[in-house]
Amino acid sequence: MKNTMLIFCLCTCLFACQKNTKQNKIAIVEELLEEPTNPAATEIWRPKPPIVTVDGANKIPSDAIVLFDGTNFNEWTSSIDSTVVNWILNSDKSMTVKNKTGDIQTKKNFGSVQLHIEWRSSKEIRANGQNRSNSGVFLQNRYEVQILDNNNNDTYVNGQVGSIYKQAIPLAKASSKTGNWNSYDIIYHTPNFDMKGNVSKQATITLLHNGVLIQDHVTIKGTTEYIGWPKNNTHGKAPIKLQDHGDNSGVSYRNIWVREL
């Protein structure tokens, strides 16, 4: 009988402890959910962001990789055969597409980036539609941001200046006058692929044209095809490519830098 009473008492104590522990946990959670009354309770001190300075006339961040400063083509190669670049190096520290010499691309491969690039259409009106100062910036060698002189020159809107070619119409046309310099500031995040090679997260692009937001965190559906639907083949880091459209476009580039994200 004494043993039975002892076991009963122990069980009662254990139950009470468990109940008390549960109540304590609830009390702790409720306390955590209460709005803090001390400012220090919501302060975070680590990790500290790295320091980036922006100096110089071209406003290049200190952690950027300069891809073109007008002095040479050291960061670039021919997309056709990986040989030297045959585009024109100008005295004003710009480069101009040399007709039918082929695209050029960075020697280094990139993933997610912040990319700054300045471009200028030909001062001379040489053609109309898609053949007037047509070029393009390709992220990871396959996703094109369109470059085109659309001043008094209409074309299909998913292929106009500032479009994600054949996919995303720009929110506005913010072009400078024909023959004047434009800037693109691009925030690009790569797609992710699962173990089977399927897209688990699509790539995205945000684009400012001359400081005007024209693509707002747009989802890229796949490769920017001239004919057919976007394709989503698995890939890793890849070059940034500039297009020779092959129509004597006369497009020039300068002040190109990139920050890896």
Image: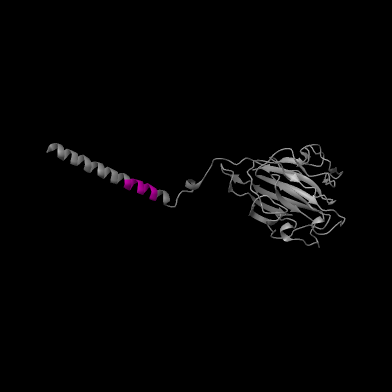
Whether residue 67 is visible: yes
* Image quarter in which the N terminus is found: top left
Between 222 and 58, the one lying in front of the other is: 222
Q: Which residue is painted at 25% across and 44% down in the image?
A: 15
**Residue 128 position (above or below residue 52):** below
Whether residue 57 is visible: no
x and y, in percent, of residue 23 in the image: 32, 48
x and y, in percent, of residue 17 in the image: 27, 43
Q: Is residue 140 left or right of residue 193?
A: right
Q: Which residue is painted at 28% across and 46% down in the image?
A: 19
Between 245 and 13, the one lying in front of the other is: 245
Q: How is the image coloured?
A: one colour
**Residue 200 position (above or below residue 83):** below
Q: Which residue is painted at 82% across and 55% down in the image?
A: 131
Between 156 and 190, the one lying in front of the other is: 156
Residue 23 painted magenta: yes
Q: How many marks?
A: 0
Q: In terms of secondary structure, what is the magenta stretch mainly?
A: helix
Which residue occupies the extreme front position in the image?
Answer: 228
x and y, in percent, of residue 209 in the image: 73, 54
Q: Which residue is painted at 35% across and 48% down in the image?
A: 27
Q: Quadrant of residue 61?
A: top right
Residue 96 painted magenta: no
Q: Which residues are magenta?
A: 22-30
Between 75 and 6, the one lying in front of the other is: 75
* Image quarter in which the C terminus is found: top right
x and y, in percent, of residue 160 in the image: 75, 58
